[in-house]
Image: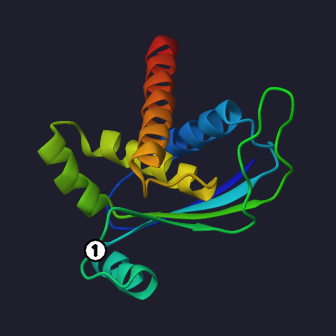
Amino acid sequence: MSVEIANESGVELNEDRFRRLIAYALDELHVHRDAELNLLFIDVAAMEQLHIRWMDEPGPTDVLSFPMDELRPGDADHITDPGLLGDIVVCPQVAEQQAQAAGHSAEQEELLLVTHGLLHLLGFDHATPDEEREMFGLQNEILATFLHNESRAS
């Protein structure tokens, strides 16, 4: 698995933890180990520009995903083919605001957003109530088991 991480946000981040989360999530979703993705952390101004350009919505957002090869999750009997998943773009400053409102750490929010963005790369969406239940349920399950396994390992 190739995960390229670039931090242009000005916020200090634990890149190794994001790599571990992505590796864990891709394993859980039966995605080929040769899949590639980029994770980019950017500041508010850059995120606002992307949000306007690609979503035609004002102001910054928390996470954007740009799928490439339209890979989908596999299953225990069939892993996905290798390919380029795409790009996940996160704004830590927006994540910080959301974390305060949710009552947890900024890093917890960033981990959630990366998981959310990864699911979007794999074709999940939340446009309908059923899609939202499926995507958010899977997102919460992946993140909770990752954090649980991580805490047991330390």
Element marked by disc 1 = loop
Q: Three-letter amino acid code at disc 1? A: Pro
**Residue at the location (39% across, 43% down)?**
112
Q: Quadrant of residue 151?
A: top left
Q: Quadrant of residue 26?
A: top right
Q: Is residue 48 above or below residue 20?
A: below
Q: Nearer the viewer, residue 124 or 26?
A: 124
Question: How many marks are shown on the rendered structure?
Answer: 1
Q: Nearer the viewer, residue 31 or 5?
A: 31
Q: Is residue 104 above or below residue 124?
A: above
Residue 65 image position (x, y, % from top left): 52, 65
Residue 10 image position (x, y, % from top left): 33, 67
Mark 1 neighbour density, 10 Å: few (under 14) some (14–19) many (20 or more): some
For the view shown, which residue lies furthest in the top direction?
152
**Residue at the location (42% across, 33% down)?**
140
In the image, taking residue 28 as reference, residue 32 lies left or right, namely: right
In the image, taking residue 15 as reference, residue 79 lies left or right, namely: right
User: How is this picture coloured?
Assistant: rainbow
In the image, taking residue 111 as reference, residue 102 lies left or right, namely: left
In the image, taking residue 111 as reference, residue 81 lies left or right, namely: right
Q: Is residue 49 above or below residue 145?
A: below
Name the residue carrying label 1: 60
Residue 104 image position (x, y, % from top left): 21, 36
**Residue at the location (75% across, 47% down)?**
1
**Residue at the location (50% across, 35% down)?**
138
